[in-house]
Image (spheres, helix red, strand yellow):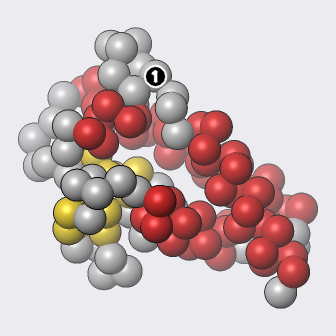
Amino acid sequence: MARRVTAAWLAFLLLAALGTTASASGIDLERAKGQGLVGEKADGYVGIVVPQTTSLVQALVNGVNAKRRAAYEEIAKKNATSVDAVALLAGAKLIERAAKGEWVTDADGVWRKK
């Protein structure tokens, strides 16, 4: 149990560092969240909220998710657990800390405003 808690907190700290990744367009994750373009998903990754989006927003999401996946893999390896378990713990923490008005998903993947 202690390993899971350690993994969750380590994931949370790494994600805080990764969460502000900027794209070439100058839009970063926090700005994209604030504009309602992207949100936090229960699976620990960022998702696109709006059905039609730009390639720049898609690139931002892909970049953030790739970095998160790498961080989750590292944490999972260090704690002898699965990547999915780490991602789900991180997802819960990220949704918990999402600001009011930001988009998040529930476990079924349904978008809702926090």
Residue drawn at x 76%, y 57% as measured from the top left: 10
User: Which residue is rendered at x = 10% and y = 41% of the image?
Assistant: 52
The location of residue 81, given as percent across then percent down, is: 79, 75
> In this view, which residue lies farthest toward the bottom?
1
- 111 with respect to 15 (left or right): left
| Residue 94 in sight from this viewpoint | yes
Indicate the position of residue 34 as horizontal and vertical percent values. 26, 39
Find numbered disc 1 in the image and state the secondary structure of the residue it sits on: loop
At 29% from the left and 35% from the top, the residue drawn is 32
> In the picture, which quadrant includes the C terminus?
bottom left
* Res 95 quadrant in image: bottom left
**Foreground: 52 or 97?**
97
Image quarter hosting the N terminus:
bottom right
Mark 1, other Cα within 10 Å: few <14 / some 14–19 / many ≥20: some
**Closer to the camera in the image, 82 or 98:** 98
State the image coordinates of residue 17 (x, y, percent, origin top left): 64, 37
* Left or right, 31 with reference to 101: right
Give the residue at mark 1.
22
Can residue 84 be seen in the rendering of this structure?
Answer: no
Is residue 24 placed above or below 71 in the rendered structure?
A: above
